[in-house]
Amino acid sequence: MTAAVAIRHLRPPDLASRWGVSVKRLADDRSRGVGPPYLKVGGSILYRLEDIEAYERDCLVRPVG
């Protein structure tokens, strides 16, 4: 039996799908210094899942009631 491998990094198409935005939007955000931190490894862009989740928490809007 093999253990499940935890996903630790997302590629831009995966993050774009998660957020419902285009890959171009993520590229534009990176060039403007907006969005979660990312890694550039061997020419590939990777987002660490922990950074994505932290960024999502920072973007959380709580309605005023």
Image: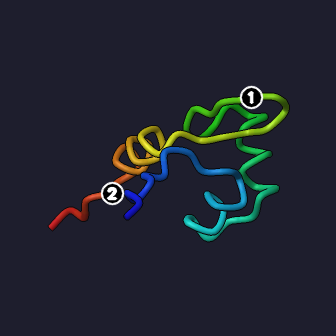
Q: Residue drawn 79% across and 38% down?
A: 44
Asked whether, in this view, residue 58 is left or right of residue 37, the answer is left
- Please state, as top left, top right, bottom left or bottom right, where the C terminus lies in the image: bottom left
Mark 1 and mark 2: span between their CA atoms?
33 Å
Q: Are marks 1 and 2 in contact (CB under 8 Å)?
A: no
- In the foreground, 30 or 51: 51
x then y, percent, for residue 11: 68, 51
Q: Quadrant of residue 41?
A: top right
Q: Kindly identify which numbered label has been placed on residue 61.
A: 2
Is 25 above or below relative to 33? below
Q: Which residue, as the protein is rendered here, is positioned at the far left?
A: 65
Pointer 1 local density, CA inside 10 Å: few below 14, some 14–19, many at least 20:
few
Using the rendered view, name the quadrant where residue 31 is placed: top right
How many dots with numbers?
Answer: 2
Kind of residue at disc 2: Val
Q: Measured along the vertical axis of the image, is residue 51 above or below residue 56?
A: above
Q: Secondary structure at mark 1?
A: strand
Task: Classify residue 5 as left or right of residue 62.
Answer: right
Secondary structure state at the residue bearing disc 2: loop
In the picture of the structure, the residue carrying the numbered disc 1 is: 41
* Quarter of the image that includes the N terminus: bottom left
Nearest the camera: 16 or 11?
11
* Residue 41 against residue 15 in the figure, above or below: above
Q: Nearer the viewer, mark 1 or mark 2?
A: 1
